[in-house]
């Protein structure tokens, strides 16, 4: 039974590392990407042969009490769905009755190292696509109803049992039940059904209707979701960025304007000139790369603040590099890079962009590939590397592994 009195969880601490990484068992990555990814649902029995539930129900409940954690409590009573946003009061769980209910905690990987370790087996998907790990706890019959997502998701059964039903392909034309907080399908046509045990995993591609229902109490599920920007998001975000950069002086001109027969016509020449004026901005690849990298790497949980009490200076950082060895990444920070012209690369961290070359670029690539990095002592002689490490440390993106 769910603990009546919930205790606060241990948050990510400076210097903590992920526990031993869990490994997918008998999972053919290349075959999965070729045959299943974004194409069809796929059940993997015993996907984690050495499965250990990463978080206890009490710890999950403790997270739901914290103001910096996004959580929701969903109850179903007589067919009606009720949603309560966190943070929840400490006595809230003691008030729950016999109605089916579900607790959802978003981005639990940003707070609990063992949950963050669940992401490691899925690094075959680019990091920039990874969103977070949502953890759910449900009583008997609990769930969030039949719905579909716009993103890929791996559903790992952590404890207890859950019945998953897979249905039709959906899109924006699919009818929804009116609700202020949930996107529930008005019609659900189940085509497949499975009961998942601890260590089992179900992959669901975007737009696929699915419904999960807890069988018995103490049902826990880990949902690893992947971001997929929409065309509307890209156009809206990039165009807003461009508008901030453009000036009123950059205007259409028609030097050499020919006399036209009808002054009421917008001529093909004018249309082409106006269109090229716009496309010259929208089509700027370098500007788009820098904007997208910064936008995509913006932190989801800025409340997980690792900024030092006293800012580090490059000379002090140079000495620290020579005496210390390993840095770890803030679990709420996002790291990505893209290769640029002339052997350079651009590192994106927490919405900021850093141009890197040579050994500094090699270090930045390594920092993007793993959650902890041993700094070569030789980097202390690189001004650009010291400047980069100092900036990342001062903005709270990295810390020393104590």
Image (cartoon, grey):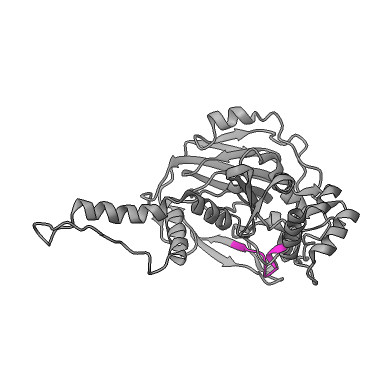
Work out which residue is located at the far left of the displayed protein and give it: 261
User: Quarter of the image holding residue 154?
Assistant: top right
Tell me the residue at 69%/56% (across/down).
Answer: 108
Residue range in magenta is: 63-73
User: Quarter of the image holding residue 273?
Assistant: bottom left
Please, is residue 20 above or below residue 332 in the view? Answer: above
Q: Nearer the viewer, residue 279 or 236?
A: 279
Tell me the residue at 51%/44% (across/down).
Answer: 210
Task: Answer whether residue 135 is visible to the viewer in this image.
Answer: no
What is the x, y in percent for residue 132? 63, 52
Q: Nearer the viewer, residue 178 or 95?
A: 178
Q: Confirm whether the magenta stretch covers residue 66.
A: yes
Which of the image's four quarters has the C terminus?
A: bottom right
Q: Nearer the viewer, residue 198 or 24?
A: 24
Please, is residue 269 above or below residue 11 in the view? Answer: above
Instruction: Left or right? Give the position of 322 relative to 34.
Output: right
How many numbered circles does the render carry?
0
Which of the image's four quarters has the N terminus?
A: bottom right
Instruction: Left or right? Give the position of 267 relative to 80.
Output: left
Task: Answer whether residue 12 is visible to the viewer in this image.
Answer: yes
Tell me the residue at 18%/54% (across/down).
Answer: 267
Instruction: Left or right? Give the position of 331 relative to 224.
Output: right
What is the x, y in percent for residue 27? 67, 30
Q: Confirm whether the magenta stretch covers residue 116.
A: no
What is the x, y in percent for residue 239? 43, 59
Please, is residue 314 above or below residue 20 in the view? Answer: below
Work out which residue is located at the far front of the displayed protein and give it: 256
What is the x, y in percent for residue 109? 70, 54
Q: Nearer the viewer, residue 125 or 320?
A: 320
């Amino acid at each position: 039974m769910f603990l009546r009195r919930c205790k606060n969880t241990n948050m990510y601490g400076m210097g903590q590392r992920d526990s031993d990484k869990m490994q997918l068992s008998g999972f053919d990555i290349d075959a999965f990407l070729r045959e299943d990814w974004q194409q069809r649902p796929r059940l993997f029995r015993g996907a984690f042969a050495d499965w250990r539930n990463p978080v206890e129900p009490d710890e999950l409940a403790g997270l739901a009490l914290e103001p910096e954690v996004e959580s929701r409590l969903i109850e179903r009573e007589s067919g009606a769905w009720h949603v309560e946003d966190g943070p929840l009061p400490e006595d809230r769980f003691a008030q729950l009755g016999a109605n089916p209910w579900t607790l959802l905690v978003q981005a639990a990987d940003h707070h609990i190292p063992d949950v963050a370790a669940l992401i490691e087996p899925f690094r075959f998907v680019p990091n920039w696509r990874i969103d977070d790990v949502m953890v759910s706890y449900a009583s008997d019959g609990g769930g969030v109803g039949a719905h579909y997502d716009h993103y890929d998701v791996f559903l790992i059964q952590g404890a207890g049992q859950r019945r998953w039903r897979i249905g039709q392909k959906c899109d924006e034309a699919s009818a929804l039940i009116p609700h202020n907080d949930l996107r529930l399908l008005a019609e659900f046509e189940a085509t497949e059904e499975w009961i998942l045990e601890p260590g089992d995993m179900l992959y669901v591609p975007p737009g696929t209707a699915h419904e999960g229902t807890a069988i018995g109490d103490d049902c826990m599920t880990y949902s690893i979701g992947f971001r997929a920007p929409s065309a509307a998001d890209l156009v809206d975000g990039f165009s807003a960025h461009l508008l901030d950069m453009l000036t009123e002086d950059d205007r259409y001109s028609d030097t050499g304007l020919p006399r036209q027969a009808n002054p009421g016509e917008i001529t093909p020449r004018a249309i082409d000139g106006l269109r090229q004026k716009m496309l010259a901005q929208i089509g700027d690849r370098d500007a788009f790369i820098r904007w997208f990298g910064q936008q995509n790497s913006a932190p989801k949980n800025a409340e997980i603040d690792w900024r030092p009490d006293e800012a580090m200076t490059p000379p002090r950082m140079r000495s620290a590099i020579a005496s210390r060895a390993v840095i770890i990444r803030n679990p709420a920070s996002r790291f990505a890079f893209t290769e640029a012209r002339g052997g350079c690369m651009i590192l994106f961290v927490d919405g900021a962009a850093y141009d890197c070359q040579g050994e500094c670029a090699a270090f930045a690539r390594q920092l993007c590939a793993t959650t902890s990095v041993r700094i070569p002592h030789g980097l202390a002689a690189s001004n650009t590397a010291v400047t980069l490490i100092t900036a990342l440390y001062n903005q709270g993106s990295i810390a020393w592994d104590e």
